[in-house]
Amino acid sequence: MPLIKSTYTAPRIFRNPHFSTIYSSTLRKVAFSTSQRDRVELEDGDFLDLDRSFSSEGNHKRLVILLHGLAGNAQRPYMNAMARIFAEAGWDTAAMNFRGCSVEMNRLYRSYNAGATEDLKAVINHILAENRYSEIALVGFSLGGNLMLKYLGETSEIPSEIKSAVAISTPCDLGASLEELSQTRNIIYSKRFVRNLKKELFRRHLAFPEKISKEEIAGCKSLRDIDELYTSRAHGYKNAADYYKKCSSLHFLPNIQIPTLLINAENDSFLSATSYPVEIAKNSKDLHLEIPAHGGHVGFIQNKKTYYHEERALEFVQNFSE
């Protein structure tokens, strides 16, 4: 599949990747709210929550499942904005809160990670059990985009109801992208991630004091430190390097067999060069790769309420809608 030539042109001030990234993640306001929270009970005794909305204009046969990024949740502006554009087009939405990302902490010591496809499978099965939807689309952001792409490429047993998928600002190579995020130019982002994740780890210490200590958490100075101490160990990986190797969607992209769009901005300072899988896309009939010049990290701003990636996601999904 040839690369898709992007039509996105950023407003001049937002051609700076940091302006677009920071504005979109911290200053954007989105007038949309979900109407229902569903709890999905998982096979290992844990749970995660879905925030649902139901289009008043739709026939309730089409649903989009949304997956958020690192240290996010279903109520982040980028999640609500994507839910809004799909709802306005007649789609119901189910926005995932990964384990431990809704108000109530999850029950187990483990939480979520970039390769936890078993949780996406559980959500899909939960929704299919409603016997309501004949058509499902998947949209993932950043870490959630990696998880979604890994899911699509690691098995050929994708439910027939899933027709298409879109990944936005996705670190397809987790280890290499973490190295980029750790560079001095990204210090404002990495420090914020570390601060928020350590806050969650201190909560986890209170529930599981025998598994992780305050001193260990306080000693984490980087995202890799957190992945060494907690993410890898809590989820059955030898160490951070093992986690990055086994969970990077880059290895699974050639196996994707449903129409899938990956939108990664050329100036996204979070992403490594290996997160732009040009050759894989050229040799795939289903992986579509679009690399706009600008957009930063989930910051494809336009001079209107909707962002470019939201319009593109809806357009792409609608193209494969029955």
Image (cartoon, rainbow, N blue to C red):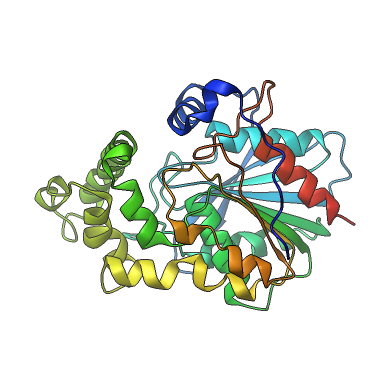
Give the vertical position of 194 relative to 234 (above or below): above
Q: Is residue 164 visible?
A: yes
**Which quarter of the image is occupied by the C terminus?**
bottom right
Tell me residue 28's x, y (percent): 54, 23
For the residue pair 306 and 82, the one nearer the viewer reads as 306
Labels in figure, total:
0
Residue occupying the point 82% across, 37% down: 89
196 left or right, relative to 167: left
Q: Which is nearer the eye, 119 or 17? A: 17
Quadrant placement of the N terminus: bottom right
Percent position (x, y) of residue 40? 56, 55
How far across and down, in percent of the image, does residue 18 sit?
A: 43, 31
User: Which residue corresponds to the image point at 87% horizontal and 40% vertical from the top-left?
Assistant: 58
On screen, residue 258 above or below 311: below
Left or right of 318? Residue 239 is left
Q: Is residue 121 visible?
A: no
Provide residue 219's location: percent of width, then percent of height: 12, 49
Residue 294, image quadrant: top right
Q: Is residue 28 above or below residue 75?
A: above
Residue displayed at 59% across by 69% down: 253
